[in-house]
Amino acid sequence: MFKNPPKDCQLCPRLVAYRRESQAKFPDKYNGAVPSFGPITAKMLVVGLAPGLKGANFTGRPFTGDYAGDVLYPALLRHGFGTGIFKSRPDDGVELTNARITNAVRCVPPQNKPIGEEENNCRPFLIEEMTSMPNLKVLFVLGCIAHVAVLKVLGLKIKDYPFGHEQVNKLPNGLILVSSYHCSRYNVNTGRLTEDMFDSVMAKAKSFL
Ligand code: SF4
């Protein structure tokens, strides 16, 4: 039976300290390790890097409460991966049907940048996530760091499975790795990632289900 890390997971001292700082400033917010969202029976796992300070760290649901989620959830709903109307709140009633969302690192890191040790500490949770999904076919990764994190889970090297937007890699275990630029505000505002590009990569991921 799959288990998310405990909300007060203590494995990464720097992230625990950062969470406590946030908790002191914003005691009514979530401020903990963020559990995955969506059914364990889903065929697609969306993997991001880590919760945003005022996004998932505040709301407790991945990609909820910040800009990246405002891009990701509407795209998932447009492509039939869920039902409801996304309102950027964990109680908005959105339900995912054939997708699950997680992060390579479950706690918010300072400057949105986890260090290698934190990625290593959190990797067992991603491994458990992936091995607990009985119908998993597609790994939809957001950004190069999440791409590498997924490859590390599987003991694979980026030189053999390169990252690029809309890059598809067929993995030795039969899973399909579909990579996208991260749907961050920066990438959207700079035009690196447009809504059409994001729709296109999500349609590609869906085509493998
Ligand atoms: S990042 Fe992962 S391993 Fe580190 S404290 Fe949070 S849940 Fe635990």
Image: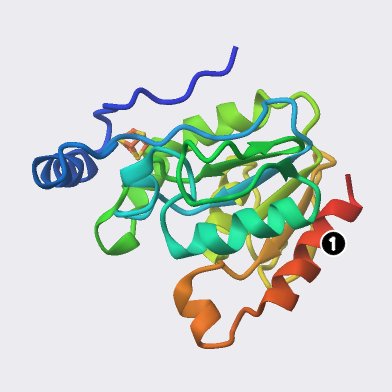
Q: Position of residue 117 (x, y in %)?
A: 33, 46
Residue located 72% across and 42% down the image? 82
Residue 107 seen from this side = no
Q: Nearer the viewer, residue 145 or 16?
A: 16
Q: Is residue 99 left or right of residue 135?
A: left
Using the image, determine if residue 103 lies above or below residue 52.
above
Residue located 62% across and 79% down the image? 193
Q: Position of residue 158 (x, y in %)?
A: 63, 62
Q: Position of residue 64 (x, y in %)?
A: 46, 49
What's the amino acid at mark 1?
A: Lys
Q: Is residue 102 left or right of residue 170?
A: left
Which residue bears the numbered disc 1? 204
In the picture, the quarter occupied by the N terminus is: top right
Q: Position of residue 73 (x, y in %)?
A: 62, 53
Q: Quadrant of residue 186?
A: bottom left
Q: Nearer the viewer, residue 146 or 87?
A: 87
